[in-house]
Amino acid sequence: MHDTPRAARTRHDGVTILLHWLTAGLVVIQFASAELWDFFPHSQKRFLIIMHMSLGVALLAVLILRILWRLIPGHALHDDATGLPAQAARAMHYLLYTLLAAQMPLGFFTAWTKNHPLDVFGLLVGSPIGPCSKTTAYVVDQIHDINAWVIMGLAAAHALVALAHHFWWRDDVLRRMLPLRQRQPKA
């Protein structure tokens, strides 16, 4: 899979690219569904909530795979880069991973503190914590919501920096994460 030495690679590997865009897509779908479901009739709102819970578990699985894949030597392109921009990029990634990793349990607890089971792909997962007060449910729900907005803000900043790299600094930072293959120079 890695015919090219790590130092000579200019693109992330296919699995890294797939996991990145799956994460981005799921984050956007999760955020949009939660922000829009109140505009739908009850039956459609219920469907969006069930989809949100199910895709939250899918996002958790993708995040775990992404972290495990990144831990395998050679899959993190330029992880040995130094300097302030490289440190900022790593800090942004680690912060996003941390907030996403916190968001899924917060979502589980949001349902459970409202005394509802999780409905994940049709499987009901009851609360392991027992009945909770409305105040507890409200606080957990607010933390879940605030964390979602912080994630979206950081993801937007991440995307804007990638676009700045492409259009302003004209380097290959965005290109190496795009799923499209680059043309190979003719021999």
Image (cartoon, grey):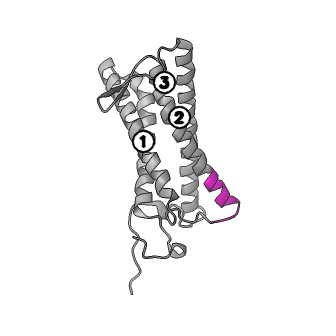
At which x and y percent is residue 44? 31, 24
Residue found at x 52% / y 23%: 141
Q: Which residue bears the numbered disc 3? A: 110
Q: Quadrant of the N terminus?
A: bottom left
Q: Quadrant of residue 99?
A: top right
Q: Which is more toward the observer, 169 or 90?
A: 90
Q: Quadrant of residue 167?
A: bottom right
Residue found at x 40% / y 49%: 22
Question: Which numbered disc, 3 or 2, marks the residue closer to the eye?
Answer: 3
Q: Is residue 152 visible?
A: no
Give the class, few, some or many, for how many residues have Cα within 10 Å of label 1's Cα (few <14, many ≥20). Answer: many
Question: Considering only order in the chain, which callout, 3 or 1, is on the residue closer to the N terminus?
Answer: 1
Q: Which residues are magenta?
A: 81-91
Question: Considering only order in the chain, which callout, 2 or 1, is on the residue closer to the N terminus?
Answer: 1
Type of the residue with mark 1:
Leu
Type of the residue with mark 3:
Thr
Q: Which residue bears the numbered disc 2? A: 148
Q: Quadrant of the C terminus?
A: bottom left
Q: Which is more toward the observer, 158 or 60?
A: 60
Task: Report how far apart the C-alphas of labels 3 and 2 lie in the structure.
Answer: 13 Å
Task: Report how far apart the C-alphas of labels 1 and 2 lie in the structure.
Answer: 13 Å
Type of the residue with mark 2:
Ala
Q: Which residue bears the numbered disc 1? A: 59
Q: Is residue 68 visible?
A: yes
Does 141 appear in magenta?
A: no
At which x and y percent is residue 88? 66, 54
Is residue 31 positioned above or below 78 on the image? above
Residue found at x 40% / y 62%: 14
Give the class, few, some or many, for how many residues have Cα within 10 Å of label 3's Cα (few <14, many ≥20). Answer: many
Q: Does dot 2 land on a helix, a strand or a loop?
A: helix
